[in-house]
């Protein structure tokens, strides 16, 4: 039984058609909705904030997977939790108070995710393993959808699997994931795959989800 989680990123959707984008995610068989929050400081792009998450919460029971690409995410964790986030993922590179921030995510009743940019050594997360429910290893530089997958990040995924053996931590891949490389990511330990352009630009979205799940 295959249980890869597919989390389409609404960054690649038409924001004026968000309701139908969420319906497409559900109808295609994906389990999560990936919400890329960008502040124009941590990354050179600005996307949307907690209101988008709150509005989507009102129209779906899918898992809301919020990826915060913002500096000092601890300032906004409660806001995103109040607006219905299920998973809140913050970047290792974005805060001086990582331990407190991760604890705060769980205190707010959410699952805690920790993200790394492609260039950050995976060993840095070792001391946070008991504080996280999900690890996100970025396979593009955060900031934009539609970039090319960086294969050199696969080794980090494998290494994470060894470090986190026996722990109940999801491993999420994000950036440039498509029907051709999904099985490689899964073989390197990914249990959750984000897809922006590969999902929203596809005619047959159910087929994309099936292929990402490996079925
Ligand atoms: C990049 C975002 C990704 C991105 C995925 O900063 O975190 O979630 O939107 O889009 P694709 O799948 O098109 O690379
Ligand atoms: Zn993302």
Image (cartoon, rainbow, N blue to C red):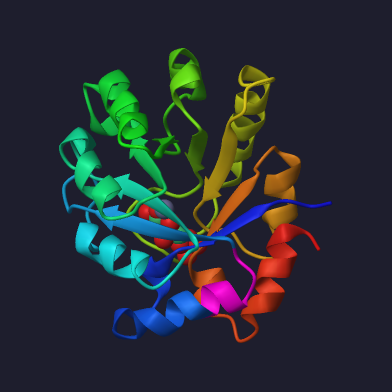
- Judged from this view, the residue extending furthest toward the right is 1
Residue 50 included in the magenta stretch of the image: no
Quadrant the C terminus occupies: bottom right
Magenta residue span = 24-30
- How many numbered marks have been drawn onto this rendered protein structure? 0
Residue shown at 45%/66% (left/top)?
A: 146
In terms of depth relative to the viewer, which is nearer, 61 or 209?
61
Please indicate whether residue 133 sits to the left or right of residue 106 in the image: right
Name the quadrant where ligand 1 sits.
Answer: bottom left
Q: Position of residue 9 (x, y in %)?
A: 45, 64
Residue shown at 22%/38% (left/top)?
A: 73
Residue 16 seen in this snapshot = yes
**Vertical relation: 183 (above or below) 121:** below
**Vertical relation: 48 (above or below) 98:** below
Q: Position of residue 15 (x, y in %)?
A: 31, 79
Q: Position of residue 64 (x, y in %)?
A: 43, 56
Residue shown at 49%/54% (left/top)?
A: 175
**Vertical relation: 210 (above or below) 135:** below
Residue 29 included in the magenta stretch of the image: yes
């Amino acid at each position: 039984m295959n249980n890869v989680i597919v989390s389409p990123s609404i960054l690649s959707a038409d924001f004026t058609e968000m309701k139908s984008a969420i319906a497409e995610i559900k109808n295609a068989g994906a389990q999560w909705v990936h919400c890329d929050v960008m502040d124009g400081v941590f990354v050179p792009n600005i996307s949307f904030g907690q209101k988008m998450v709150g509005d989507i919460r009102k129209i779906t029971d899918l898992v809301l997977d919020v990826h915060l690409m913002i500096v000092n995410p601890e300032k906004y964790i409660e806001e995103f939790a109040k607006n219905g986030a299920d998973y809140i993922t913050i970047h290792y590179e974005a805060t001086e108070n990582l331990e407190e921030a991760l604890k705060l995510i769980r205190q707010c009743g959410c699952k805690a995710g920790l993200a790394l940019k492609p260039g950050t050594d995976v060993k840095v997360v070792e001391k946070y393993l008991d504080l996280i429910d999900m690890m996100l290893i970025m396979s593009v530089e955060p900031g934009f959808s539609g970039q090319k997958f960086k294969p050199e990040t696969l080794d980090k995924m494998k290494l994470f699997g060894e470090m986190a053996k026996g722990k109940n931590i999801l491993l999420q891949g994000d950036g440039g994931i498509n029907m051709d490389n999904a099985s490689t990511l899964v073989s390197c330990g990914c249990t959750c795959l984000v897809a922006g352009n590969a999902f929203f630009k596809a005619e047959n979205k159910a087929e994309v989800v099936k292929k990402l799940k490996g079925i």
